[in-house]
């Protein structure tokens, strides 16, 4: 296996499940948002404030392209990584893609106390999440080898399902 790549909306559990998967598979874990922060020396809300979403997405594209060149890791991506066709192509060719699907209600519950979500600073985070999911869900599905529901499920159960479903896939 090249890489195991997790996509999905914010609050779907990509980082939590990614760390558990990496431990189970004895592979390194990378989070594309954390990589951006390490490479720039700035946190994501600051990048959004100073460079706007466009500036952040350019940095994100460069980091995803670089990370997808590696072999043998678990990669968690930011929720909006699928918005650029170049990212979708890199993720698709970079390994097996798992879409972690979560309802808007679950996303709200998991992100309500997180101040590191620039897109949720709006007046109605529920509307923002619904709007984002309407746009991004088809893109997640377009590149996914496997789709796994994460609502109301313990992370370890999600990890086991991912491992079973990935193992059942034919090689590509």
Image: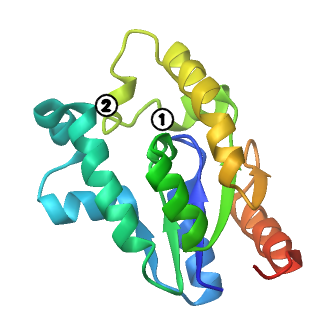
Q: Residue at x 58, y 70 (%)?
A: 93
Residue 59 percent coordinates (x, y): 25, 52
87 or 52: nearer the viewer? 87
Q: Which residue is drawn at 15% across and 31% down?
A: 49
Is disc 1 in contact with disc 2, using a CB cutoff of under 8 Å? no
Q: Determine whether, in the image, residue 4 is placed left or right of residue 31.
A: right
Q: Say if 57 sits above or below 117 in the image.
A: below
Q: Say if 7 sits above or below 47 in the image.
A: below
Q: Determine whether, in the image, residue 121 is placed left or right of residue 78.
A: left
Badge 1 element: helix
Q: Which residue is drawn at 58% across and 52% down?
A: 13
34 or 154: nearer the viewer? 34
Outermost residue, top side: 123
Q: Which quarter of the rendering shows the C terminus? A: bottom right
Q: Which quarter of the rendering shows the N terminus? A: bottom right
Residue 82 percent coordinates (x, y): 51, 46
Residue 62 percent coordinates (x, y): 29, 60
Badge 2 element: helix
Q: Determine whether, in the image, residue 53 is placed left or right of residue 13.
A: left
For label 2, the crowd category at 10 Å Cα-Cα, with few meaning under 14, some 14 to 19 and many 20 or more, is: some
Q: Residue at x 53, y 87 (%)?
A: 72
Say the numbered circle drawn on residue 118.
2
Q: How many marks?
A: 2
CA–CA distance between discs 1 and 2? 11 Å
Q: Which residue is disc 1 drawn over?
A: 111
Q: Does label 1 or label 2 sit earlier along the sequence?
A: 1
Q: Say if 78 sits above or below 1 in the image.
A: above
Q: Determine whether, in the image, residue 149 is placed left or right of residue 127.
A: right
Q: In which quarter of the image is residue 136?
A: top right
Q: Identify the image's colour scheme: rainbow, by chain, secondary structure or one colour.
A: rainbow
Q: In which quarter of the image is residue 32?
A: bottom left
Say the numbered circle drawn on residue 49.
none
């Amino acid at each position: 296996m090249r890489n195991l790549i997790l996509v999905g909306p914010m609050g779907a559990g990509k980082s939590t499940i990614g760390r558990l998967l990496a431990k189970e598979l004895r592979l390194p874990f990378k989070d594309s948002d954390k990589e951006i922060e390490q490479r720039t020396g700035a946190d994501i809300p600051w990048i959004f404030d100073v460079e706007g979403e466009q500036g952040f997405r350019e940095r994100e594209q460069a980091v995803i392209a670089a990370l997808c060149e590696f072999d043998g890791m678990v990669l968690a991506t930011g929720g909006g990584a699928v918005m650029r066709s170049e990212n979708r192509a890199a993720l698709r060719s970079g390994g097996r893609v798992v879409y972690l699907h979560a309802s808007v209600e679950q996303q709200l519950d998991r992100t309500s106390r997180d101040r590191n979500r620039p897109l949720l600073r709006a007046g109605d985070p529920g509307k923002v999440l619904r709007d984002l999911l309407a746009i991004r869900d088809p893109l997640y599905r377009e590149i996914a080898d496997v789709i796994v529901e994460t609502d109301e499920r313990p992370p370890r159960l999600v990890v086991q399902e991912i491992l079973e479903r990935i193992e059942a896939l034919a090689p590509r």
